[in-house]
Image (cartoon, rainbow, N blue to C red):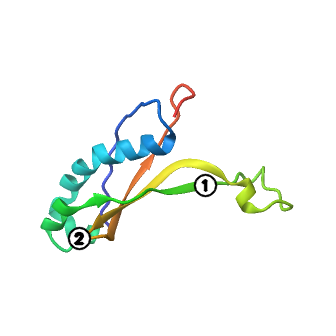
Amino acid sequence: MVAALLIAGISYAVSPEEQAKICAQENLPNYLRMIADDYKNFHFSSKEDLTRASLGEPIPNVRIGMKELDMNKTLKDQAEPYPFYVFPVMVDNKAVTDFTVVLEKVNGNL
């Protein structure tokens, strides 16, 4: 399996989801360049597909701490947003692969 890792810093006064979107938009071109020679392993049909690739809407993730788990409440009521966003990478309105952004707290801020 081939994996590509891209690390970038970002700090904006916007919501975590917006930060993730900005980071993904800014870094998608770099990611696509990194995987260009190995495009088939990332489920692209051709190198030309890389030039037509765009980001879909992020898939948010949530977490429930095991210590906080209350069997008397619904999981939905206990779920907390988690700063981990998976963006489908789209070609011709079809998801081909994904691009993940994980936000990290620095000095108490995401």
- Left or right of residue 70, residue 79 in this image: left
Q: What residue lies at 33% left-to-right and 66% top-to-bottom?
A: 97
Q: What residue lies at 42% left-to-right and 30% top-to-bottom?
A: 11
- Left or right of residue 12, residue 31 in this image: left
Residue 110, above or below 65 = above
Q: Which residue is mark 1?
A: 62
Residue furthest to the right in view is 72
Residue furthest to the top in view is 107
Q: Which amino acid does the dot numbered 1 rest on?
A: Val
Q: Picture coordinates of residue 12 (x, y %)?
A: 42, 31
Question: Which of 42 and 13 lies nearest the eye of the viewer?
Answer: 13
Secondary structure of the residue carrying tag 1 is strand
Label 2: how many Cα within 10 Å (few below 14, some 14–19, many 20+): many
Q: Which residue is mark 2?
A: 44
Q: What residue lies at 23% left-to-right and 70% top-to-bottom?
A: 44
Give the position of the N terminus as an image quadrant.
bottom left
Secondary structure of the residue carrying tag 2 is loop
Residue 101, above or below 46 = above
In space, the residues marked 1 and 2 are separated at their CA atoms by: 29 Å
Corner quadrant of residue 18:
top left
Question: Which of 22 and 47 lies nearest the eye of the viewer?
Answer: 22
Question: Which of 19 and 41 lies nearest the eye of the viewer?
Answer: 19
Q: Which amino acid does the dot numbered 2 rest on?
A: Phe
- Left or right of residue 79, residue 84 in this image: left
Tags 1 and 2 in contact by the CB under 8 Å rule?
no
The answer to which of marks 1 and 2 sits earlier in the sequence is 2
Q: Picture coordinates of residue 13 (x, y %)?
A: 47, 30
Q: Picture coordinates of residue 21 (x, y %)?
A: 39, 47
